[in-house]
Amino acid sequence: MAPSAVYYAPPPVQAQAQEKPVLAAAVPAKGPALAIGSPATAQDGKYQSLITSLEQSRKVERHMVDRLLDGATTLPPSSFASVHVSLSPPEYETLAPRLSELLAQLLGGLEPLGTLHILNLDSALPNLPSELSLAGFTVLSATQDGALIAQKPAHSTASSVSLKTAPAAALPLRKKTDPDRKASKKALWTLNAPSTPSIDAESLLTPADRERPAACEPAVRGAPRRKKACKNCTCGLAELEAEELAQSKVVLLDGAPNGETVEVSQSEKERLIAAAAAAPKATSSCGNCYLGDAFRCSSCPYRGLPAFKPGEKVEIDFGMDDI
């Protein structure tokens, strides 16, 4: 006889205390059963009494809950018509973090329309009905003695086909293309489209554009200038700028022995640059050259350079005229 589900209504009582009809499951008497226990229910005799009552009408397979959770025992798929779990209330509370793992194993071991009986619940696991629904069970009834009965659907969620992997025979979806629209879009981005009129580039030039630019006037000393000399200057501006640069002076900060600023010529600037370049190779006879010009000799190669730390390489950037 195939497993089935039937409704029954409890006997009528007072009008205020009437209960709703409860859905119960009928399990074949000869279907194999799985009894899951724990050391606590084995000691108080509840596990043994459960096995004795089940063995009167069917074949019973016995396992401890810790062996299922530790992976020591694996349930064969779709092999049991009913599963009976008998634990103590404290053990149910301890099982709560791994309850979903256990329910997944029990769902795979049950036959379609097989039932799951969770016994000795009392007030433990108040969220058990929602956990059963998330695992794929259908909650049937809850008895007054602290038991909960759930059923595996005829088509388990574990056997559903994943939408991420399409069947091998399925063909990929193809987008319908409009030939006219495709041709118009291609012509839009074509540089030499037949419908595009050609433009004469000479007609876009104005008379001002056709005028030849005036030649550069010769540079005059003291005359206002609007630009610097070109790279290949032929008007003499480059030579004039080079002459003015050679005659100009450079301001050195802290250039005097007393720390004041001083103006020096370009030749003195070149000498200081050479002194800075040769400073790492020079040797000091007095050992006070790093203190500044006030402690240096007249022939000191560091003369004119700022003070520095002993052993430090002296470097001066003369790229800016105000330094």
Image (tube, rainbow, N blue to C red):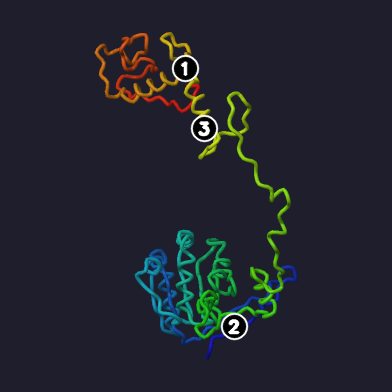
Decide which of tag 2 and tag 3 comes sooner along the chain: 2
Helix, strand or loop at label 2? It is strand
Q: Which amino acid does label 2 sit on?
A: Ala
In the rendered view, would you say 270 is above or below 105? above
What count of labels does the image hold? 3
Which residue is depicted at the point 57% across and 62% down? Answer: 127
Q: As rendered, which of 118 and 317 lies closer to the eye?
A: 317
Q: What residue type is labelled 3?
A: Ala
Between marks 1 and 2, how big is the CA–CA gap?
101 Å
Q: Where is residue 211 in the image (x, y as percent from the top left)?
A: 69, 48
Which residue is depicted at the point 47% across and 17% down? Answer: 253
Residue 5, disc: 2
- In which image quadrant can residue 295 be found? top left
Q: What residue type is labelled 1?
A: Leu
Which residue is depicted at the point 74% across and 68% down? Answer: 16
Q: As rendered, which of 112 and 60 lies closer to the eye?
A: 112
In front: label 1 or label 2: 1
Q: As rendered, which of 279 and 246 lies closer to the eye?
A: 246
Residue beneath label 1, please?
253
Decide which of tag 1 and tag 3 comes sooner along the chain: 3
Residue beneath label 3, please?
238
Q: Position of residue 208 (x, y in %)?
A: 72, 48
66 lies left or right of 169: left
In the rendered view, would you say 18 is above or below 211? below
